[in-house]
Image (cartoon, rainbow, N blue to C red):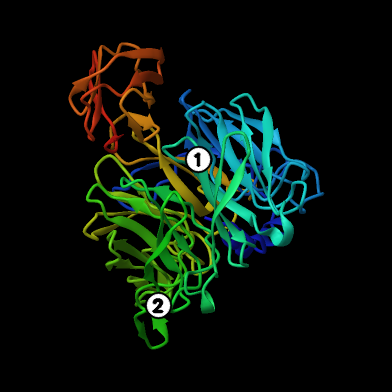
Amino acid sequence: MGKLNVVAKSSAVFLLWAAAAVALPAQTVPVRPSAPVFTTLHNFDDTHGGLPSAGLVEGIDGNLYGTSAGGSSLSLCNPFGCGTVFKITQDGTFVVLHYFDGTDGYGLDASLIQATDGNFYGTTAQGGANNQGTAFEITASGVLTTLYNFCNLPDCSDGAGPEAIVQGSDGDFYGTTEGAGFTGGTVFKLTPNGVLTTLYSFCSESNCTDGLEPVGELIQGSDGNFYGTTYIGGADNGGTAFRLTPSGTLTILYSFCQQVKNQICTDGFGPLAGLVEGVNGSFYGTTSAGGANSNSGTVFKITPSGSLTTLHTFCSRFIHGRCVDGSDPAYSLILVTDGNFYGTTQKGGIHDRCDYECGTVFKITPGGAFTPVHDFCSYTYFPCPSGSNPNGLVQDTSGNLYGTTYLGGANGDGTIFSLSVGLGPFVETNPAAGKVGANVGILGTDLTGATDVTFNGTATAFRVVSSTFIEAKVPSGATTGTIQVQLPSGTLSSNVPFIVLR
């Protein structure tokens, strides 16, 4: 998710300042009948971080790390501060690791990633030496290093306004910029020591048929290629889904707004988020607008060959003026351990005044069966303890879901929450792919007594580093498949297959 959505949200913050905030403790909030357990872990304020615009990432220490767009009393960047990087434990202990001051960037719109070296990496959409954003490294203790200042080349051919990054199987980082390049944004590669290569510049074709404004994050597919979306552009100017080889060859898989009825793009318009690969090899994503109902967005499936299926159209349940199934999804889906996908919408839900605010958490199966899970409240009502306008989700290796809201909470500056949906613990690998002999980190909970680690049934040497982290090697003879860790209490399996590269 990029800053397009943050700009749209920011005007709402002034409404909050006009209302009196009510101090509320962390609490559990009941919603729909038989709903999972929702708990507010932290309420942001405008000094110690606020207005988080991205989701969280689990570290190898078992804690969660994230960014906020606001924070501190500095007004050099915007009225809300320059942003922060923070850490929070699963029980809600919150620590700010770094306050940005503008010279090192501001406009933190994207999630962090933890790389294989144990450090975190991220981007700022603005600020830095050229005021066009930065890429940075930050340690778990808060030591920040700027790796690259964007718009460092004439005409910003290296890009401006970077979005989220991902670490490729080669150890380098890959990401997008919303602007510059050929004026439509770029895809870039960045080495850990800060050497940037522009792989592709959008709007290189007539009428930008290859897309422009790639604000969603990339993913590396099981075939080694990168997949992503552009917000607009394409053959029908509704955005695109694309594939890019590591060397920079781009293929458009689908141009949105091919199907138009009553001036609405029934196949969706404007994907703001990236894609996620399912276990069946297809990719799943959302559009922020379009669809058959009230222009409220869609969930779709797309095959590697570009065949698109709309799985759900939001605002399909419109009751008393409310889109009770949500509207305007703007963040990537996540694939959880039961094989289903979870996601968020920024608007809609069962509460009042949710046509322009509130938001939901939802579950959708690979076949399209849709279930609302949680409803957020209206930020114009105080109190709004659960928060409003949720960002993306992450599944922690405990099995629970965690996320942030941009607004609402006790101080109106957003929240951090957990959501228990009845899923058990699992293990997760970092990286998600590797060659035989490569070192692989395994994240989990209560790993101290591990007695055996296997890669799709092939045993390997390993070392238990802590209760939340194991180091292992990809063994000779290993094939792509599930990683399992044997514990005295039972066996933990990986959430997705580990890909053995040849």
> In the image, which disc is placed on residue 56?
1
The answer to whether one can see residue 305 in this image is yes
Disc 2 crowd, CA 10 A, few/some/many (<14, 14-19, 20+): many
Q: What amino acid type is highlighted by mark number 1?
A: Leu
Taking the image as shown, residue 206 lies to the left or right of residue 79, namely left
Q: How far apart are labels 2 and 1 at the CA level?
A: 32 Å
Taking the image as shown, residue 5 lies to the left or right of residue 84, namely left
Compared with residue 34, is residue 353 higher up or lower down, i.e. above or below? below
> In the image, which disc is placed on residue 257?
2
Q: What amino acid type is highlighted by mark number 2?
A: Cys
Callouts 2 and 1 close, C-beta under 8 Å: no
Compared with residue 146, is residue 470 higher up or lower down, i.e. above or below? above
Residue 413 in picture, x, y percent from top left: 64, 48
Residue drawn where x is 33% and y is 34% of the image: 399
Compared with residue 207, is residue 198 higher up or lower down, i.e. above or below? above
Residue 458 in picture, x, y percent from top left: 19, 22
